Amino acid sequence: MTSRKILETKYRISETAMALFLKEGYANVTVEAVAEASSVSRRTVFRHFESKDELVFPDHTERLGLVERCLAEAPAGTDPVDAVIAATEESLREFLSRPELVFRRYKLTRIVPELRKREVVEHERYVALTRSFLRDHLPPDAPPFQPMALAALIDAIHRSALGNWLREGGATDPVAELKAGMEWVRRLMVHQSAFSTAPVLLALLPDTPQTRRVLTSLKDAAEELP
Protein backbone atom coordinates (compact mmCIF):
# COMPACT_ATOMS: atom_id res chain seq x y z
CA MET A 1 0.00 0.00 0.00
CA THR A 2 1.40 3.40 -0.99
CA SER A 3 2.01 6.11 1.61
CA ARG A 4 -0.77 8.20 0.02
CA LYS A 5 -3.20 5.29 0.29
CA ILE A 6 -2.21 4.75 3.92
CA LEU A 7 -2.82 8.43 4.66
CA GLU A 8 -6.22 8.36 2.95
CA THR A 9 -7.21 5.34 5.06
CA LYS A 10 -6.13 7.18 8.17
CA TYR A 11 -8.23 10.23 7.25
CA ARG A 12 -11.24 8.06 6.42
CA ILE A 13 -11.09 6.35 9.82
CA SER A 14 -10.74 9.71 11.53
CA GLU A 15 -13.67 11.30 9.71
CA THR A 16 -15.85 8.27 10.49
CA ALA A 17 -14.84 8.44 14.15
CA MET A 18 -15.61 12.16 14.43
CA ALA A 19 -19.02 11.68 12.83
CA LEU A 20 -19.77 9.01 15.44
CA PHE A 21 -18.44 11.17 18.28
CA LEU A 22 -20.69 14.06 17.25
CA LYS A 23 -23.73 11.82 16.83
CA GLU A 24 -23.43 9.54 19.85
CA GLY A 25 -21.09 11.40 22.20
CA TYR A 26 -17.34 10.98 22.53
CA ALA A 27 -17.51 8.93 25.74
CA ASN A 28 -20.08 6.54 24.27
CA VAL A 29 -18.14 5.51 21.18
CA THR A 30 -15.60 2.68 21.41
CA VAL A 31 -12.65 1.98 19.14
CA GLU A 32 -14.43 -1.20 18.12
CA ALA A 33 -17.42 0.86 16.95
CA VAL A 34 -15.12 3.10 14.94
CA ALA A 35 -13.48 0.08 13.33
CA GLU A 36 -16.83 -1.45 12.41
CA ALA A 37 -18.18 1.80 10.94
CA SER A 38 -14.94 2.25 8.98
CA SER A 39 -15.00 -1.34 7.65
CA VAL A 40 -11.55 -2.07 9.08
CA SER A 41 -10.24 -4.17 11.94
CA ARG A 42 -9.55 -2.88 15.44
CA ARG A 43 -5.91 -3.67 14.78
CA THR A 44 -5.93 -1.41 11.71
CA VAL A 45 -7.31 1.47 13.78
CA PHE A 46 -4.51 1.11 16.31
CA ARG A 47 -1.96 0.82 13.51
CA HIS A 48 -2.83 4.41 12.59
CA PHE A 49 -3.76 5.82 16.01
CA GLU A 50 -2.15 5.12 19.36
CA SER A 51 -5.19 6.18 21.39
CA LYS A 52 -8.82 7.15 21.06
CA ASP A 53 -8.18 10.89 21.31
CA GLU A 54 -5.68 10.69 18.43
CA LEU A 55 -8.58 9.80 16.12
CA VAL A 56 -9.51 13.49 16.08
CA PHE A 57 -6.00 14.60 15.06
CA PRO A 58 -5.01 12.50 12.04
CA ASP A 59 -3.23 15.34 10.27
CA HIS A 60 -1.10 17.02 12.92
CA THR A 61 1.94 14.76 12.61
CA GLU A 62 1.92 15.14 8.83
CA ARG A 63 1.48 18.91 9.13
CA LEU A 64 4.31 19.15 11.63
CA GLY A 65 6.46 17.26 9.14
CA LEU A 66 5.38 19.69 6.42
CA VAL A 67 6.47 22.68 8.51
CA GLU A 68 9.75 20.96 9.35
CA ARG A 69 10.45 20.32 5.65
CA CYS A 70 9.60 23.91 4.71
CA LEU A 71 12.05 25.21 7.28
CA ALA A 72 14.78 22.76 6.28
CA GLU A 73 14.35 23.57 2.58
CA ALA A 74 14.34 27.36 2.96
CA PRO A 75 16.92 28.80 0.50
CA ALA A 76 20.24 29.85 1.96
CA GLY A 77 20.17 33.45 3.13
CA THR A 78 16.43 33.47 3.79
CA ASP A 79 15.52 35.61 6.78
CA PRO A 80 14.59 33.12 9.54
CA VAL A 81 11.37 34.99 10.36
CA ASP A 82 10.37 34.88 6.68
CA ALA A 83 11.12 31.14 6.65
CA VAL A 84 8.79 30.58 9.61
CA ILE A 85 6.12 32.77 8.02
CA ALA A 86 6.31 30.82 4.75
CA ALA A 87 6.05 27.50 6.62
CA THR A 88 3.07 28.81 8.59
CA GLU A 89 1.28 29.90 5.42
CA GLU A 90 1.89 26.46 3.90
CA SER A 91 0.51 24.85 7.06
CA LEU A 92 -2.67 26.91 6.85
CA ARG A 93 -3.23 26.01 3.21
CA GLU A 94 -2.89 22.34 4.16
CA PHE A 95 -5.44 22.83 6.95
CA LEU A 96 -7.91 24.33 4.49
CA SER A 97 -7.53 21.45 2.05
CA ARG A 98 -9.72 19.28 4.31
CA PRO A 99 -12.40 21.67 5.57
CA GLU A 100 -14.89 19.00 6.70
CA LEU A 101 -12.31 17.37 8.95
CA VAL A 102 -11.34 20.73 10.46
CA PHE A 103 -14.97 21.75 11.09
CA ARG A 104 -15.80 18.46 12.77
CA ARG A 105 -12.74 18.72 15.00
CA TYR A 106 -13.64 22.30 15.89
CA LYS A 107 -17.09 21.19 17.06
CA LEU A 108 -15.68 18.30 19.06
CA THR A 109 -12.96 20.27 20.80
CA ARG A 110 -15.57 22.77 21.96
CA ILE A 111 -17.66 20.13 23.72
CA VAL A 112 -15.04 17.56 24.87
CA PRO A 113 -12.50 19.02 27.34
CA GLU A 114 -10.15 16.07 26.85
CA LEU A 115 -9.87 16.85 23.15
CA ARG A 116 -9.46 20.55 23.79
CA LYS A 117 -6.45 19.79 26.01
CA ARG A 118 -5.02 17.52 23.32
CA GLU A 119 -5.42 20.33 20.78
CA VAL A 120 -3.37 22.66 22.99
CA VAL A 121 -0.62 20.04 23.17
CA GLU A 122 -0.62 19.68 19.38
CA HIS A 123 -0.22 23.45 18.95
CA GLU A 124 2.67 23.45 21.39
CA ARG A 125 4.51 20.93 19.22
CA TYR A 126 4.34 23.38 16.33
CA VAL A 127 5.46 26.34 18.46
CA ALA A 128 8.35 24.29 19.86
CA LEU A 129 9.52 23.49 16.32
CA THR A 130 9.46 27.09 15.08
CA ARG A 131 10.95 28.37 18.34
CA SER A 132 13.88 25.96 17.98
CA PHE A 133 14.42 27.02 14.37
CA LEU A 134 14.43 30.71 15.28
CA ARG A 135 16.77 30.11 18.21
CA ASP A 136 19.25 28.45 15.84
CA HIS A 137 18.95 30.96 12.98
CA LEU A 138 18.32 34.43 14.42
CA PRO A 139 21.41 36.68 14.72
CA PRO A 140 23.63 35.88 17.73
CA ASP A 141 22.91 39.30 19.24
CA ALA A 142 19.12 38.84 19.14
CA PRO A 143 17.45 39.19 22.56
CA PRO A 144 17.17 35.77 24.27
CA PHE A 145 13.38 36.08 24.52
CA GLN A 146 12.93 36.74 20.79
CA PRO A 147 12.69 33.13 19.48
CA MET A 148 9.96 32.26 21.97
CA ALA A 149 8.12 35.56 21.50
CA LEU A 150 8.14 35.39 17.69
CA ALA A 151 7.16 31.72 17.55
CA ALA A 152 4.22 32.35 19.90
CA LEU A 153 3.18 35.51 18.04
CA ILE A 154 3.21 33.88 14.60
CA ASP A 155 1.30 30.88 15.94
CA ALA A 156 -1.28 33.15 17.60
CA ILE A 157 -1.93 35.00 14.33
CA HIS A 158 -2.23 31.67 12.52
CA ARG A 159 -4.71 30.33 15.08
CA SER A 160 -6.67 33.60 14.99
CA ALA A 161 -7.08 33.45 11.20
CA LEU A 162 -8.11 29.78 11.32
CA GLY A 163 -10.37 30.31 14.34
CA ASN A 164 -12.22 33.22 12.72
CA TRP A 165 -12.79 31.11 9.61
CA LEU A 166 -14.20 28.26 11.71
CA ARG A 167 -16.43 30.48 13.87
CA GLU A 168 -17.84 32.15 10.77
CA GLY A 169 -18.57 28.84 9.07
CA GLY A 170 -15.97 29.36 6.36
CA ALA A 171 -17.16 32.87 5.42
CA THR A 172 -13.83 34.65 6.05
CA ASP A 173 -10.58 34.56 4.10
CA PRO A 174 -8.05 33.03 6.51
CA VAL A 175 -5.19 33.16 4.01
CA ALA A 176 -5.61 36.91 3.50
CA GLU A 177 -5.98 37.42 7.26
CA LEU A 178 -2.81 35.46 7.92
CA LYS A 179 -0.87 37.38 5.27
CA ALA A 180 -1.98 40.70 6.80
CA GLY A 181 -0.87 39.50 10.21
CA MET A 182 2.49 38.35 8.87
CA GLU A 183 3.08 41.74 7.24
CA TRP A 184 2.48 43.28 10.65
CA VAL A 185 5.14 40.97 12.10
CA ARG A 186 7.57 42.01 9.37
CA ARG A 187 6.96 45.70 10.06
CA LEU A 188 7.48 45.03 13.75
CA MET A 189 10.88 43.49 13.01
CA VAL A 190 11.85 46.42 10.76
CA HIS A 191 10.96 48.94 13.45
CA GLN A 192 12.87 46.97 16.06
CA SER A 193 15.93 46.82 13.82
CA ALA A 194 15.76 50.56 13.11
CA PHE A 195 15.45 51.49 16.77
CA SER A 196 18.11 49.03 17.93
CA THR A 197 20.73 50.48 15.55
CA ALA A 198 19.79 54.16 15.74
CA PRO A 199 21.80 56.46 18.04
CA VAL A 200 19.93 57.74 21.07
CA LEU A 201 19.83 61.42 21.91
CA LEU A 202 19.04 62.52 25.45
CA ALA A 203 18.29 66.16 26.21
CA LEU A 204 16.88 68.31 29.01
CA LEU A 205 14.53 70.96 27.67
CA PRO A 206 12.48 73.69 29.35
CA ASP A 207 8.77 72.87 29.66
CA THR A 208 7.41 75.67 27.47
CA PRO A 209 4.62 75.78 24.85
CA GLN A 210 7.22 76.04 22.09
CA THR A 211 9.11 72.97 23.37
CA ARG A 212 5.87 70.98 23.52
CA ARG A 213 5.01 71.94 19.94
CA VAL A 214 8.43 70.81 18.73
CA LEU A 215 8.21 67.49 20.62
CA THR A 216 4.72 66.87 19.25
CA SER A 217 5.99 67.53 15.74
CA LEU A 218 8.87 65.07 16.25
CA LYS A 219 6.51 62.44 17.64
CA ASP A 220 4.15 62.81 14.65
CA ALA A 221 7.08 62.51 12.24
CA ALA A 222 8.31 59.34 13.98
CA GLU A 223 4.88 57.70 13.73
CA GLU A 224 4.87 58.30 9.97
CA LEU A 225 8.07 56.29 9.48
CA PRO A 226 7.46 53.07 7.48
Image (cartoon, grey):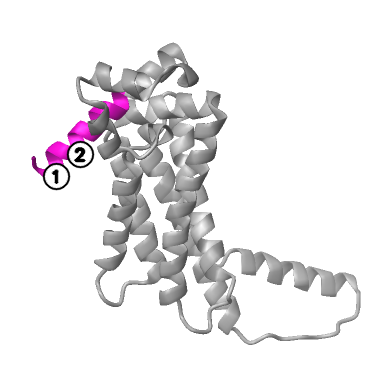
What is the spatial separation of the Cα atoms under label 1 and label 2, in whole angstroms?
A: 6 Å
The residue that appears at 36% across and 42% down in the rendered structure is 175
The amino acid at mark 1 is: Ser
Q: Can residue 12 be found in the magenta stretch?
A: yes
Residue topped by disc 2: 7
Using the image, determine if residue 104 lies above or below residue 205.
Answer: above
Q: What x and y, as percent, mark residue 152?
A: 53, 56
Q: Can residue 57 be found in the magenta stretch?
A: no
Which of these two is toward me, 195 or 131? 131
- Whether pointer 1 and pointer 2 mark residues with C-beta atoms closer than 8 Å, the reply is yes
Left or right position of 28 against 210: left
Residue 203 appears in which quarter of the rendering? bottom right
Residue 87 appears in which quarter of the rendering? bottom left
Residue topped by disc 1: 3
Residue 84 visible in the picture: yes
The amino acid at mark 2 is: Leu
Residue 171 appears in which quarter of the rendering? top left
Q: What x and y, as percent, mark residue 18?
A: 37, 23
Q: Tell me, for residue 11, which label it has, or none.
A: none
The residue that appears at 24% across and 71% down in the rendered structure is 75
Task: Tell me where the magenta segment starts and ends, as one range.
Answer: 1-16
Tag 1 secondary structure: helix
Using the image, determine if residue 225 lies above or below residue 18.
Answer: below
The residue that appears at 24% across and 66% down in the rendered structure is 73
Q: What x and y, as percent, mark residue 27?
A: 49, 20
Q: How many marks?
A: 2
